[in-house]
Image (tube, coloured by chain):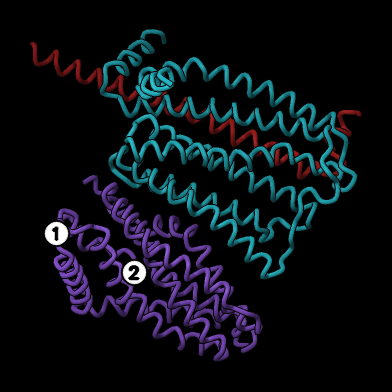
Amino acid sequence: MSGARVSSACAAVLRRDLLLAWRRRGDMALPVLYALIVATLFPFALGPEAQLLARIAGGVVLVTVLLAMLLAFDGLFRPDLEDGSLEQLMLAPQPLPLLLAMKIAAHWLTTALPLMVIAPLMAGMYHLPWPAMKVLLLALLIATPLLSLLGAVLVALTAGTRRSGMLLALMLLPLCVPVVIFAAGAVTAAQQGLPWVAPIAWLGAALALALVLAPLACAAALRIALDA
Amino acid sequence: MSLHEFLSMGGYAQYVWPAYALFFVMLIADYLAAGTRRRRVLKELRGRMARQKAREARRRS
Amino acid sequence: MNKLVYWYHKLGSPPTFYRFAGVLRPWCLAIALILAVIGLYGGLYLAPADYQQGDAYRIIFIHVPSAWMSLFIYGVMAVAALVAVVWRMKMAEVIAMQSAPIGAAFTFITLCTGSLWGKPMWGTWWTWDARLTSELVLLFIYLGIIGLFHAFEDRRHGARAACFLILVGVVNLPIVHYSVVWWNTLHQGTTVRIFGKSNITTSMLWPLLVMMFSTKFYYAASLFGRARADLLDLESGKAWVKQIASDEEARS
């Protein structure tokens, strides 16, 4: 197996997933719409004082993005499982973790990236000042791929089960607690004028670790869940 | 120490005793669950075995 | 070493484990009950009231052993899950899966008794203290494992997937704990010290240790009971299970 063929297979998987996502553009808009709705509802519940909204802005945006991503996780493997192309992928001679990494990357590009585009809009609605907004975007840029990678492992584990959105949420909660803590911690620190590099660095370290380990774990989980 | 004194737990009875009650209720329920499940499994199995025996008897006759 | 390998294979066989667990279960329960009586006599009656907390601290004798058990059972599950994932051993899957509800029960007890203790001491049922929050996350991990196990049609399939989730949790749990500690210092919340200034004295310590052993034996008894029932379900087509079913019918 030459390196060129592995990379061309990876590119093919990435291209296919992006193309499929593009053909169903409407589905791509749903998480974005959901995030906007949730972000709009909070001020109605809490009142419109700018000070309060600015204080909770980072947390609200982060949790909203997380929930919207959770909503989209079901589409990571299920369509491929239903039309049988996931089994083809598992039988392919190329290493499965690499191919899955490509799938996760495509999923991140199509679900998390649109959310990141509207994140400044949501933060703006909450009057988050610009210096903190920069940190929020940086935190999102690291936290969303991390969540995609962690979520992919769990989605792979539930691949063989009936539709189980609530179960996925329950399983993901313990994994995303540290991510939310560090990402929101960085934004809070930036808002208070404190150094915010440390939590971001921790997130970055976690992302580096997850980039290597999560595709491997995802492949193992998929093999267990589908009993290949 | 009188029984009344013991039960009042220095005024904290309303916290101490519910905690102990919860502890024992949870663990007793947990322990009994195993026995209940065992009996149910065996009952189902006996039902299956009886049905199988009846089917074999019918086939032989 | 040879003997160890022999016992590993011997206990890995369901009928042997079933008989072995059946013999040990009443003994474990009896020891647990005797230790509980001794420990609670020492804790509720002999030990003096704490000079700061009065008698409310007596919740410690069930709260702390439960908290230890919630982690200990997760440790047992982690070892069993590793064996199950690597060697696909059926008994290890059964032990990991049947431990989960017991662990969840102990975690729930820890949270509830902690809350009942917290109300008179800190004036609130719940604070976002690092230890409490980690324990809550642990409960969610337990529930996720149980939920995943039951989500599959095929039981062994579900057990293997849940065992994988247990291993993910092993990596995650320390990360959750340390991140929650960091979060707590960042937000300067109410940091709670259970053993405030009053150092724990011997008269309080020995009932605590006795209760710790009592809960360990209880866990063994409960696990054996659950594993036995589960084995009968799992192997219900096999001859040895049919034998037990008809024997029990004859006796009743």
Determine which residue is flagged by label 1: A1
Q: Is residue C206 above or below residue A218?
A: above
Q: Colour of chain A?
A: purple
- Give the number of callouts: 2
> Mark 1 and mark 2 in contact (Cβ < 8 Å)?
no
**Nearest the camera: A93 or A48?**
A93
Which quadrant of the structure image shows residue A217?
Answer: bottom left
Q: Position of residue A106 (x, y in %)?
A: 27, 72
Type of residue at label 2? Ala
- The residue drawn where x is 20% and y is 19% is B52
Q: Chain of mark 2?
A: A
Q: Colour of chain C?
A: cyan
Rendered red, the chain in question is B
C109 sits to left or right of C100: right
Q: Is residue C189 above or below residue C99?
A: below
Q: Position of residue A196 (x, y in %)?
A: 59, 78
Q: Chain of mark 1?
A: A
Q: Which mark is residue A72?
A: 2
Same chain letter for marks 2 and 1 = yes
Tell me which label, 2 or 1, sits earlier in the chain. 1
